[in-house]
Image (cartoon, rainbow, N blue to C red):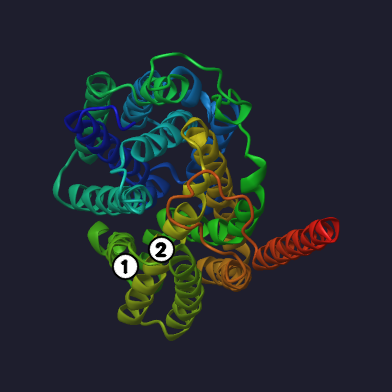
Amino acid sequence: MSELPLAGRRRGFGFAITATMLMMIAASAPSPFYPELAAQFELPPVAITLIFAVYAFTMLATLLLTGALSDTVGRRPVIATGSVVLAASLLLFWQSGGLAMLLIARALQGIAAGLLLPALSAMVVDFAPPRQSEAASLWNTIAAMTGLGIGAITSAFVLDLVVDASSAVFGTLAVVFILAAAVVWATPDSTRSTRSARSTRSTGVRVERSRSERPRSHLAVPARLRRPLGVAVPAIIAGWATNGLFLALASSLVAQEFGATTHAQQSVAIPIFAVAGIITSVLLRRRSARLVSVYGTSALGVGTALSLLALALNSLPVYLLTVAVVGTGFGTAFMGVLKTLMPRVGPTERAAVMAVIYTVSYLAFGVPTIVAGLLVPVATLRGAMTVVGVVIVVLCAVATMRRLRIRDVPDGNEAAHPVTELSDVLVERADRDGAASAASASGERGSRGRAGEGR
């Protein structure tokens, strides 16, 4: 990517961050509407979680089928298509008149997100400043958290202040994504530039790329990434399960358990969660991937445990304070995953790897929310949140212990660091020491032999 003009890099980087934020705004904007929709259409709690979760499952299917598509056909066509589909889904949500239409709208939104997320996340990495290795993971995290917070709280205020809130929220967002589908064509073609740079030497002669450098047409994880990705999975599940529960049920929880009456009061936990994650991510951006990851999973687990205590005490201020702790954990846990994995990923593997990360993320995003919705009639909303919360705490403990065993990639070894476990490093070091000893012994034997011949 170094051959691109600086202005082009900045334009592409800015667009990718802005579009990611807007996509997450569209994802969280419906959350404050859920209690109102439940009352309007007389829906049970499980129906609301199903509306929420269908987004996650259609997104998963799209990720599995097309997650690596932008590595092959380019970022711009995939982003343009996803933006148009997202605009259509928002128009359907705006005009919905019942449960069936809401499910169709959210399903389309999930398809759009499955197209957009890996392409936009890879685009952020493509155009990130080359000498700032932490920039891509930081800005991917900031954009997602900012969008989640803005979407929820803005929709809540619009519901409180505007008579036709759905027109104001969903109509406006639909127009924005139609514009995004057009604006993306003004950004550089990052994948073409990457392929050209890797297939042409300084003399201008095209050379055959190795198998690992070719774009992948299917969803796959390179062998060198499977171990660190496996270690990251508990952190991804814990973080995104928490995220899903906040977006689907936090407004109803604050209304039922703490007596909040306005939509802004009911949704206040979501922006607190997001802002805390953003601030902590910025403060820890230059720290090692291991430190960021361990802090993230620890804060997520401790914050979740404290939030269950706040529910038992029935204290809204304490609950909101614990939400801030949880937010710092989610933001840094996800950034830690990206900081751990992305330095090992080649340019033609980025969308595929991001698609795998988001496949795990949104599976965790949807399934616990459905489980919680099914538990509500049996165990109440507080009981359902407690059950899922205990599982999240256990996952955080497992994630923290496993991440402590993984070494970080040294600077400058991008996409080429083969072994990451501390035990493997010790074995490598022993092998190198043994090879050096063998070479030294061989050299000594050769010297003695030459000396004997001289005599």
- The three-letter code of the residue at mark 2 reads Thr
Label located before the other in sequence (2 or 1) = 1
Q: Which residue is mark 1?
A: 280
In this picture, residue 256 sits left or right of residue 427: left
At x 40%, y 39%, the residue is 121
Is residue 418 depicted above or below 294 in this figure?
A: above
Percent position (x, y) of residue 445? 82, 61
Viewport quadrant of the N terminus: top left
Q: Quadrant location of residue 169?
A: top left
> Is 97 or 149 nearer to us in this picture?
149
Viewport quadrant of the C terminus: bottom right
Find numbered disc 2 in the image and state the secondary structure of the residue it sits on: helix
Percent position (x, y) of residue 95? 33, 27
- The three-letter code of the residue at mark 1 reads Thr
Q: Is residue 237 visible?
A: yes
In this picture, residue 158 sits left or right of residue 80: left
> Is 9 or 314 nearer to us in this picture?
9
Please identify the residue farthest to the bottom as the structure is shown.
313
In this picture, residue 231 sits left or right of residue 348: right
Image marks 2 and 1: residues in contact by CB distance under 8 Å: yes
Please identify the residue farthest to the front as the structure is shown.
455
Please identify the residue farthest to the top as the structure is shown.
205
Characterize the local packing of mark 1: few (<14), some (14-19) or many (20 or more) Cα atoms within 10 angstroms: some
> Is 107 or 361 nearer to us in this picture?
361
Q: Is residue 88 visible?
A: no
Characterize the local packing of mark 2: few (<14), some (14-19) or many (20 or more) Cα atoms within 10 angstroms: many
Q: Which residue is mark 2?
A: 332
